[in-house]
Image: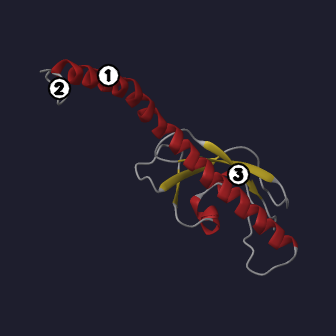
Amino acid sequence: MKKIQAGFTLIELVVVIVILGILAAVALPKFVDLSDEAGTAAANGVAGALASATAVNYAAKMVNKTGAVVLNGDNAATCTSTALKSFISGVTLADGIAATTDGNTYNVSAGTGTCASNAGVAVSCKIRGSKGSAVDATIICTGA
């Protein structure tokens, strides 16, 4: 009478564990790298929201809608948390370019361009979160 195998042998189990270990060692560094990419993508989302909100604000200002926010002055005054906080909700804006420690706070700093009192001029502000690199947000000035 032949004996029927009822389970896996020890060698088969060890081989499966070794293969899983190799797969984990190869895949884990890739997932660690994704946190910086996710941080940059989140900063891009905040930058896009600010760009969209300031474009809508500019359009509202051009049709004399009450409640439109005046955005003018030099780039250092435009690219501040005080000037931009009314255009976005759900995140906290702070001044500076250093990486933040809070995942919900994004630092704003001056980029290029100047609003002065020119309506429709685009300036660039740097946005940076807790991970990833700083990205540019295009802010549309409203003039006086």
Residue 71 is left or right of residue 134, and the answer is right
Say above or below: 116 vs 130: below
Within-10-Å neighbours for mark 3: few <14, some 14–19, many 20+: many
Badge nearest the viewer, 2 or 1: 2
Badge 2 element = loop
Say above or below: 92 vs 24: below
Which one is earlier in the sequence, the residue at label 1 or at label 3? 1
Say above or below: 35 vs 85: above
Residue 37 seen by the camera: yes
- Image quarter of residue 118: bottom right
Type of amino acid at the residue the image marks with label 1: Ile
Image coordinates for residue 87, horizontal then vertical, percent:
65, 66
Q: CA distance from mark 3 to mark 2?
A: 80 Å
For disc 2, the marked residue is 4
For disc 1, the marked residue is 19
Type of amino acid at the residue the image marks with label 2: Ile
Q: Nearer the viewer, residue 1 or 120?
A: 1
